[in-house]
Every structure is written in C-alpha cells, then in structure tokens.
Amino acid sequence: MILLDELQATLKNFPKAQCCWVAYSGGCDSHVLLHVLASLIRLETNDVNCDVAAIHVNHGLQSRADSWSRHCAQVCNELDIQLKLLKVNAKAKTGQSPEAAAREARYHAFAEFLPQNDILLVAHHQDDQAETLLLQLMRGAGPRGLSAMPVMKVMGDNTLLRPFLNVSQQVIKNYAVQHQLHWIDDPSNSDTRFDRNRIRHEVLPVLKQRWPSLSKTLARVTQHQAEAAECLLDLAQNDYSRVQAKQNLGISISKLGQLSVARQKNVLRYWIEQLNGFDAITSAHLNRIFNEVIPAASDSQPKVTWQNTQICRYRGVLYVLALEKNTLLSGSQDWQISTILELSQQRLIANDVWGQGIKKSLITGGNLTIRFREGGERCQPSGRANHHSLKNLFQEWAIPPWLRSQIPLVYIGSEIVQIVGYCLCEPYAAAPDELGIVIVSEYL
C-alpha cells in the first residue's frame, strides 16, 4: 500500500493532464511504477483523472536492446496500457560520459514526443536520491546541486513527477517479488567504471553497514539544501533588481560593491544562469571576475572567458556575451510592421500607441527597413537641435563597442527614424495627438 499511497498523493497534489506517461525502461523500478499505476486506475476511487500510457526509449547501446523493447510491449499489453516506443542515437560525444549521453538523448526524446501539458512519471527512489547527492558532493556542488532531484520538475511544456522519491529501493523490490513481476536487468548498471554504479555497489553498501538509515538521512539533507537554494534564489532576484545597470544590459560594479562578497557571487551566478544561451559559470571563473575584472582600472577592458561565454567590463558595468552569437550584422531587411520580425538575436514587435513612437502616417504601406551600423550614419535625436553621428551617440550612451553593431536601426527611405531602445529621430516622432508605432525589442 505504501507505493500506491505515494503515487496517489503525488498525482493528487500536482496539475491535471490529458495523459500520464510512465518512463518505462523495463527495469524493476519502472516496471513497479507501471504496475502500481495500472492497479490504481482500476480502483473505484482514485485521483487519476486522465489517460495512462507508457513510453520506452531504445538507446541502441546494448545488443539486446530490441528484445527489451519487445519485453516492454508484452508487459504493457498484459496490463492493457498503451506503449510508445522511441529510438534514439545515444552515442557519447567527445568528452561526454556514456551515462550523460544516454540521459540527454532520452530526455530530449521525451520532450520532443510528449503532447503539451502531459505528465511524465519516472521511478527514481530514495536510494537514487542518495547516489545523486553523493555524486554532487564529489563534484563540489552548492546548495542547488546538493538538493539533488525534486519530486516535481517543469520539463518544457510538460511536468516530470517522481512519486517514489521517499521510498527505498528495497520496498520497490519487495513489491516486484510479491507480485511476481518479471523485469530486465541492464548489465551496464553493474559496471563500476561508471561513477554512479561505483557509489551504488561499493560505497553506499559500506556506509549502510554503519548507518542503516543512510538513504533516508541523505534524503533529508537534500530537502534542507533545496530550501537553502530557494532562499538564495529569492535573495538573488531581489539583489539583481538593485544592481542592474542602465537599460538592464549589465551589472553596475558600484551597485554590486554595496553587497557582501557572498551576495555578490550569488547574484552574479543568478544573472548569468537566468539569461538564455550562456554557459554556467564555475567557481574558478567567478573568482577570476572578482580578482581580475571588478578591481581593474576604469579605462581598461578586462575579460574572463569560458566555453562560449565571456564576461567583459566597460565604463563600470559588467556584461555577459555569448561568443558564438557575437557576430557583425549587415545588410538591410524590409519589415511589414503587422508581423513580428525575427532577427539573429532578438525580435522586433510594433504596437500602435497614441502620442508615442514613430508617426504611423509616415509609414507607407506599413513597411519599414531595418539595418545595422556600418559606419558614418547620422541622425537628429528627438528633442535635439542638431544631427549627431551614431558613434558619438553610442559613446554618450555608454554602449559597449561589441553591442553597437547589434542595435537595430529603423529607416524610412534613406533616413534613420529610430535607434531601437535608445531614441526616435526628428522629424518622425509622433505628436501627442498622433497615432504612433512603438517598436519593442525582445532578446531571444
């Protein structure tokens, strides 16, 4: 009843879906999860108000992989549960562990296949949680890493649930034996060349001889760490709003310095991680930012680079760059303002607003032209008497050199009418009683 109660409680506490899918490998743990779910939906009173199905991923890494797929199909047929079979290429990339490659391929397949808002159930248990915590300790992880696996995780448009996370593996095996289930033993799970298997077969058994309740205790540790990570996230979000530079393009070094060093590191990690397309920062690179970038002379432009990400300093502000995206843009592109214009790193959206933006009456046929800086451009910012070069305006606005070529310039004919995000140009600004077009830029 323990497993049935855990599953029912989990499903009751989380969002409803059209279908609950069991990630079914054919192994003991996922077979038990599937069997318990099949039993639950046959009860007159249950909290499963959706369809139930299983999904099996054939990684193609074992010679018996196809026979495992047939086994899963036979079990699902006996339980009268729909099964979806997926095949993936789980070959490891250079420098990638086979475990990580298989996991990445598997979850990518789940994300690609699952219909929107469906639930994926996985059979991770308390002992898996203990293994994950020990692995993270060996990697020097912080509170978020040491919180290991959550019961619920958002996975794109879907929800991943781990209903057995507070249940020991022994309870699961006892259920399998009691109900005479037949499952697959993947030989790779016994290969102690893999870190998780070594912890499972050689480390945890020794520790449990001295501390029999170790997995339960370590599960409590992960809960404490999850709470600490949540507190650090709340603190980082509050601090981030305080240290942002003008136009939210970077971090003000002077504002950052008003925080303790621990809070500075916390908010810098948050800043980098909440931006799309940037690599997570290591402690070593974070220390380099504090030792080389932040204390550098105001007229210098120090940099710290890792993988495809770079931290730069310019006029007292820290900026983060994705190196593979830091390319010069050129040419021009016509834009029908009734549509969203997708650029390489951002999208432009035009909204009708009275008394703001570009005079709509001057936009012939609803078309504008978007270009990027090539050199020599001039315009007259709204409210100013004279024309200025873009170079001088960008210097005045303290825009870093590497960002200047990525700012969209809006043209009507040969005239710049707006520098997106910075200014409108004369004589194109809408008067208070005129309908205007406000252009909004959203970074991808």
Image: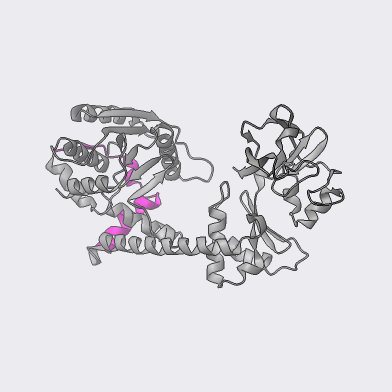
Q: Which quarter of the rendered picture does the C terminus lie within? A: top right
Q: Is residue 443 visible?
A: yes
Closer to us: 253 or 184: 253
Q: Main secondary structure of the magenta part?
A: helix
User: 136 above or below 347?
Assistant: below
Closer to us: 134 or 206: 134
- Magenta part of the protein: which range? 180-208
User: 65 above or below 257?
Assistant: above
Coloration mode: one colour
Residue at screen point 87% across, 50% down:
386
Residue 173: percent from the left, percent from the top?
19, 46
Quarter of the image for residue 396 reads bottom right
| Left or right: 67 as drawn, with respect to 398 | left
Residue 362: percent from the left, percent from the top?
75, 33
Residue at screen point 18% across, 50% down:
171
Residue 431: percent from the left, percent from the top?
73, 44
| Left or right: 102 as drawn, with respect to 380 | left
Closer to us: 74 or 255: 255
Q: Is residue 282 visible?
A: no
User: 151 above or below 206?
Assistant: above
Residue at screen point 33% across, 39% down:
119
Residue 31: percent from the left, percent from the top?
24, 38
| Left or right: 429 as drawn, with respect to 26 | right
Q: Indicate whether residue 150 is drawn in magenta.
A: no
Q: State the count of labels.
A: 0
Residue at screen point 44% across, 36% down:
90
Quarter of the image for residue 349 reads top right
Closer to us: 250 or 26: 250
